[in-house]
Image: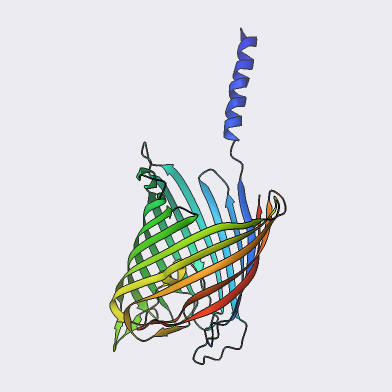
Amino acid sequence: MNTLKIPFVVLLLTSGFAQAEEFVPNGSMGFTQTFYGNSGSYKTSTSHPALFLNYNFSPKWGIQIDWDRLWNTYHYSGEPKQQDNSLSQPVGTLNYTYGYLGNSRVNWSSSLTIENRNSFRGANPTYSFISTSFDFYEYLPSSEYISATQFAISPKYIYGWQSRSPTGHVNTGVLSMLTNWTLPANFSLTLNAHLFREWYNGSMIVDGENTHYSNANYFMLLAWLNYNNTLYQFNDKTALNFNFVGGFDPYIASNKKAGWNPFLAENLRYEWLGPSVMSGQYRSTYTLFALPKLNLSYQYDKNLQVSTFIQAKYFNQVWGSSEKDWRLQPQIGVAATYNF
């Protein structure tokens, strides 16, 4: 009897271990080097290397580390029509994916992030933020014309402080609606709306018209239409792809009239480089852009992909009390991604 039970117990234990070992830690790492040109008579030429690492160390937990370094490729002297893009920005994020809530089809995920933005010219703020997301997209009906891939409500809290003098801090409470939609003919649409309130202290207080604001309310909309298509498949490893994205990046409005540019507006926009000039005091403003891109990719093996791209961004160089001076900015770059 015992000789029969022992193999059965061993089989159960072996089966349990096999199930426990089904998850294999995985991730990706890579870099992108982008060169931005001037935008007409506006000096915007910039070099932008970026590194990233994503690592999933359990079925529900993962980390993401990004570092972006930008510097001007011309002599910045503070003259009109010059954009100072000197910046070092390391970011670390801890992600948690719970999955479905109970017996529902609501996907729940959360993240904790810390980010530093060193401009090398005095400002060196650090931001920590915690966010959670409840995605209801599986409840939405779909058709051959439109289907949702995200329909999430996401509250977020952000605390920012100056890492060196002059001291100051800002508290931000955010409620977001995040949506992504698949459309016919290789199109997709992103519509993200954010309501947030900020409380300012010290050097982070916002200057308005003959006054200072210790708090402000904001509404921000980011809306991007995206198109992807493979123009030519040279072989099973090499392809030429075309991508187009354009829209509001962002539209933003406030209950206060000031020359503000909230952290969230810079943090969530699609493109790194925004308008060159912030014009006057205002309650609402926007950036409107179009970005066509050609990308040549080569799949070296199942883990490594390299690519080179050329693109051109058309957008307004002035925003604030007025939006004007739409200019074309050429951009080129290379990228590599390794999956493990």
Horizontally, residue 98 falls left or right of residue 15, namely left
Reply above or below: 176 against 251: above
At 33% across and 66% down in the image, what residue appears?
Answer: 196
Q: Residue furthest right?
A: 300
Q: Nearer the viewer, residue 69 or 126?
A: 69
> In the figure, 250 relative to 181: above or below?
below
Q: Position of residue 121 (x, y in %)?
A: 53, 84
Q: Residue at x 53, y 43 (%)?
A: 59
- Residue 21 in the image, given as x and y percentages of width and height: 60, 35
User: With respect to residue 238, does 209 lie above or below?
Assistant: below
Front residue of 60 and 252: 252
Q: Position of residue 147 (x, y in %)?
A: 41, 49
Looking at the picture, tell me which residue is in the foreground, 13 or 67: 67
Residue 130's image quarter?
bottom left
Residue 1 lies left or right of residue 215; in this view the side is right
Query: How was the colour assigned to the protein in this rendering?
Result: rainbow
The quarter of the picture where the N terminus appears is top right
Query: What residue is shown at x 55% (from left), y 86% (from top)?
Result: 43
Please identify the residue farthest to the top as the structure is shown. 1
